[in-house]
Amino acid sequence: MKKAKIKYALLCLLAVVVALVWVFPIFYMIISSFKAEADVVVPGFIFSPTLENYQTVLSDTFFQYLGNSVMITIGTVIVTVLLAVPAAYALVFTPLKDPNNVYFWFVSTTFLPAIAVIIPVYLIFQRIGLVDNPLALIILYCGAGVPLMIWLVTNFFKEVPMEIVEAAQLDGCNRWQAFWQIMIPLVRNGIFSAALLVFIITWNEFFFAVTITYTESATLPVYMSKYMTQQGYFWGKMCATGTLICIIPIILGFFTQKALVKGLTSGSVKG
Amino acid sequence: MNKANTKKKDHSTRVLLPAVIFVAAVTQIPFVVTIIFSFLKWNVKRPDLGIKFNGIKNFVDVLTAKNFYIVLKNTLIIIVVCLVLCTVLAILLGVLFNRKFPGGYFFRTLLVMPYFVMDSVVGIVWKTLLLNPSMGLNYYISKFFGFQPIDFFGKHSLATVVILIIWQWTPFFFLIIMAGLQNIPDDVIESAKIDGANGFRRLVSIDIPIIKKHIITAMTLGLINILKVFGLVYVTTQGGPGVSSANLPYLTYRTVFYDWSVGRAAAIAVVTVAITLFITQKFFKATNKDEE
């Protein structure tokens, strides 16, 4: 018995070590962001921490990119929720001819690679002056966000017991009331987590951001990618920028994990 | 799927329609236009040449270029190697973490972190801090063991891209497979113990069949996303040296935004989409057949 216990403890320890090794690159970036430029290159964890990098990094340029990222991401999340949640509701609870086909059509659009649309989109946006305009990115990101949101939220709606819907109808609720007063509170957490996921994916998106913007409306991923060419070898500052950019999705990721798994697996796994 | 049993006429299509129209306008219509473009001879930077019909010449050009086949091979290598290794690693990690201990949940969530970090940060941190042969950890570790630093972004660029994708995506596979492992009913585990099945045998003959659907879900979503990988390549190797580490999305990007020949780029895009759909469909078929 004792032997089994030791084995169990060792396996737990191994799990902890593996987790720490796996995320080491992220830790190493965060630690390096507190090192003075002279110390960054030399590996080691003994150094006098400094906030110098962060003071330099928080410049007007950074705030301009941050502002773009925040505006574009929040705009995308709002429009996505407004378009996708009613659509998912209609797919599950209203008499449509072929709800499954429409649902799978939405899901299948997520398979389409971005390069399949970028050429005409770029030429059209250029003609109507939307290149390097935040609106362009919001439109494109909603095109990716709406299907994903419908995918997840439909699965959450499907878990609402039919009895509740019937009870609401017996009580004389119309669909609109049933939607707002009964459905939304029941799937609120699911919608919230799906919205967080759309937030994270939009915040991190790189392909459209790098192709459809130049300087005015570029987002943080683009800022980061230009870092090496524009700022040269200031690794401490690069790490500080990277840390600042990644903090938000990492924190949101902690909260959205469980619902993410539920939304992505419940449709296919139970199916 | 349709839960409504009271079939009365209402405004449900009106609620659904905005989303359908919007998604069609942003994804499907541009793709159809891309297909039309792929038959044109059109260079945006040379308006004097005009726009002409080019037949299937663009496709012939694309499919006879040597680079295309190198890139196609790269794409297939990336997909196969990453899917297999991400799945195997995620199952092993899942088994390792499927036990209760203090802080267990915390470390499990920690492990998922790389999935939420954006491509450009992942790429730059690995390219500089870790793998840079003259200043990164790569240099110090090689010096410590007394060998030459590994040339990750020159000689081994494709392998490096593969490693980074595996590092970033295994946590996502782990997240879904872990959920499956935790759903295995206790009595199944108990009876397995009584039967004396443990360790590797239990994993292969009991656990994996039970969580098969979770594994397939993880692989499907992984496949869709790894086929699209762009940012990591852009930031770390720029597809190089030459096209040795470029995948199809990156090659298309380069054709559009470097030489601005719309017709050719559209042809590559169409071919890429066709290959993407082909691979996805083959995968669906294989996994569905498996289930029956």
Image: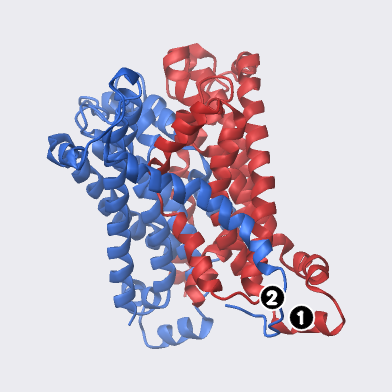
Chain colours: A red, B blue
For residue A94, above or below residue A184: below
Task: Judge whether residue A25 can be spotted in this image.
Answer: no
Q: Is residue B226 left or right of residue A8?
A: left
> Residue under mark 2: which chain is it in?
A
Callouts 1 and 2 in the same chain = yes
**Tags 1 and 2 in contact by the CB under 8 Å rule?**
yes
Q: How many C-alpha atoms fall within 10 Å of the one at disc 1: few (<14), some, or many (≥20)?
A: few
The dot on residue A164 is 1
Q: Residue B255 at what x, y percent from top left?
A: 29, 30
Q: Amino acid at mark 1?
A: Ile
Give residue A246's quadrant in the image: top right
Question: Residue A64, relative to residue A101: is it above or below?
Answer: above
The dot on residue A160 is 2
**Residue at point 53%, 44% (across, down):** B116
Chain letter of the residue carrying label 1: A
Q: Quadrant of residue A228?
A: top left
Q: Residue at x 31, y 53 (%)?
A: B276
